[in-house]
Amino acid sequence: MKYHIDTIPVWDAVKEMCGCPMCRLKCKIEENDVVRYLGGSVMEPSTRIQVNAKGFCPRHQMLLYAQKNRLGHALMMHSHLQETRKEVKSIFERAEKGKTAGGGLFSRSRGEMKDAVASAAKSLKAMASSCILCDSIRENLDRYAYTLIHLYQTDSAFKRAFIDNGGVCLSCAGDLLALAAEEMKGEVLSEFLRDLDATLSARMEQEDHDLKNFTLIFDYRNAGKALDGTKGALERTVNTLRGACLEEPK
């Protein structure tokens, strides 16, 4: 799969020299999308059609709600609710009547009945888990990941900056390696694998040291002692292991 190359945001994220650059890009995409969906786009027909079909996950509902634009939020949810009611009714009707003509749910065999109910359950879960914001974030993040892979292969200055930045978190390392397996080959792929291994290992080794020191400051025997790396140690470790989810101290 090919993506549009957009180097400036990726370069900017790497130059910040703080945490995982892919996670920073994800946070910026999310912030912009939340504002956009409650801004002028709330009344755009194309946006409303997508929102009606997919809605928002619990996390993004919370972020939208925190914007305190109750009217915009309510307008989107009202039309989404109306579309959801139609689809839910259709799902239950299909489960009760089945795909073939004649015979209701209880006139079919036990196996057919179980399959129909399981299919309805799957459809309801899919509706409840879809999110237009998650899809938008993933699409944009995939584009930035492709750009990062491209820059690593073609720009030696970027490669050096990426390594000096400390690489990426565990989750983003997996995403980048999956893309690298498609887009790289030979020695370049081997070098990228080594660089990701080295930067991630160094990051986790440092956080192992810092987090240990953080736990030690709670020991009364270390009262008043200044231990290295304790500020933000917990937040950094969590963000490395699971992607950016805790705000780190400035």
Image: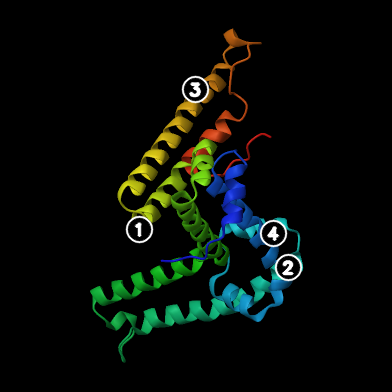
Residue 103 in the image: above or below residue 120 = below
Is label 2 in a helix, a strand or a loop?
loop
Give the SS element for disc 4.
Answer: helix
Between discs 2 and 3, the one toward the N terminus? 2
Q: Position of residue 30 (x, y in %)?
A: 61, 57
> Which badge, 2 or 1, is on the more N-terminal residue?
2
Q: In front here: 50 or 109?
A: 50
> What crowding class fits label 1: few (fewer than 14 Cα within 10 Å), some (14-19), or many (20 or more)?
few
Q: Which residue is found at the position 58% from the left and 49% from the top?
A: 11
Q: Nearer the viewer, mark 2 or mark 1?
A: 1
Query: Which amino acid is tagged 1?
Result: Glu
Q: Who comes first in sequence, dot 1 or dot 4?
A: 4
Q: Residue 66, how many percent across, how many down?
A: 71, 55
For discs 1 and 3, the disc positioned in front in the rendered view: 1
Residue 115 horizontal side relative to residue 26, left or right: left
Residue 188 x, y percent position in the rendering: 36, 48
Q: Which residue is mark 1?
A: 182
Residue 21 position, x and y percent, is 55, 46
Disc 1 is placed on an element classified as helix
Q: Report, in whole angstroms, how far the alpha carbon at label 2 lies from the one at label 1.
A: 37 Å
Disc 2: which residue: 39
For the N terminus, the quadrant is bottom left
Separation of marks 4 and 2 at Cα, in angstroms? 13 Å
* Label 4 sits on residue: 65
